[in-house]
Amino acid sequence: MSHPVQTPKAIVFDLGKVLVDFDYGRAAQRLAPLSRLDTDSFRQLIDQSPLLHELETGRIDFTSLVDIIGKESGYQGTFEFFQEAFTDIFTEIPEVIGLHSELRSRGIPTYLLSNTSGVASDHVRRRFPFFGHFNGYVMSHEVGHMKPATPIYEALERMAGFKGADLLYLDDRADNIEAALARGWQALLHQDAAASVAEVRSRLGW
């Protein structure tokens, strides 16, 4: 049964692949030569292994991650170089950042809901000025749960003071969108920046 779409009162953004693109291959290209692994194997170790999930849910800290990867890969570089390479993987998506700026200028509350680690979010905060201009943040490593688990959405609702269709959420993963829709949120599967911007503006009646 379909429901009429109401005008949202707040916009919630995912971070990775929505506001910033990222590529762990960039990190692997720099780190693999200091290990016994080839670039693709190193990328899988930092991107597709359970270690990243452990880091992004706050179950291990970044120092522990580097220690474990060091043992598994034979990495011989410094901790500082590893951290710099591991975090320097992000590039801005200008159209969506422009939308966020416009929302702020019009007084629409905005929130960030992200599966991310402390070391990554700290880097993005330092590197990209837009990051400092949300009304609130819910990060998986801080709440101990990752999307699409229910508790991280509940944490956003508590912090923002909005529920259901008052919230409009952009995410690039279908499972995360389905979890938001199941809570009654409005949600857009982000696949193209221009299309997402146009749809948000449409739902706001702009």
Image: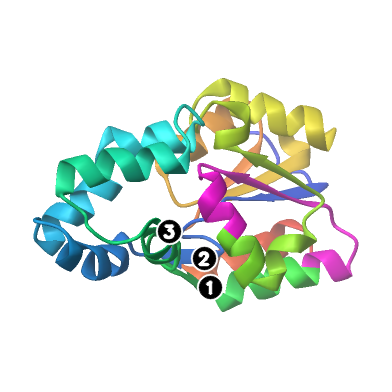
Where is residue 136? Give x, y as percent.
78, 46
Please state which of residues 85 and 174 is positioned toward the viewer in this rendering: 85
Q: Which residues are magenta?
A: 103-122
Q: Residues within 10 Å of mark 2 (few under 14, many from 20)?
A: some
Amino acid on which disc 3 is placed: Gln
Q: Does any portion of residue 145 appear in the rendered image?
A: yes
**Residue on which the image places disc 1:** 93
Whether tag 3 and tag 1 are in contact, CB under 8 A, the answer is: no
Q: Are marks 2 and 3 in contact (CB under 8 Å)?
A: no
Q: Residue at x 80, y 33 (%)?
A: 159
Q: Where does the image place residue 6, in percent across and percent down from the top left?
A: 77, 44
Label 1 crowd (10 A; few <14 / some 14-19 / many >=20): some
Indicate the secondary structure of the residue bearing disc 3: helix
Does residue 7 appear in this view?
no
Residue bearing the label numbered 2: 20
Tags 1 and 2 in contact by the CB under 8 Å rule?
yes
Q: Disc 2 to disc 3, how far (Cα)?
A: 19 Å
- Nearest to the observer: residue 37 or residue 149: 37
Which residue: 83% across, 47% down?
A: 9
| CA–CA distance in space, label 3 to label 1 | 23 Å
Quadrant location of the N terminus in the rendered image: top right
The residue at which mark 3 appears reads as 83
73 sits to left or right of 128: left
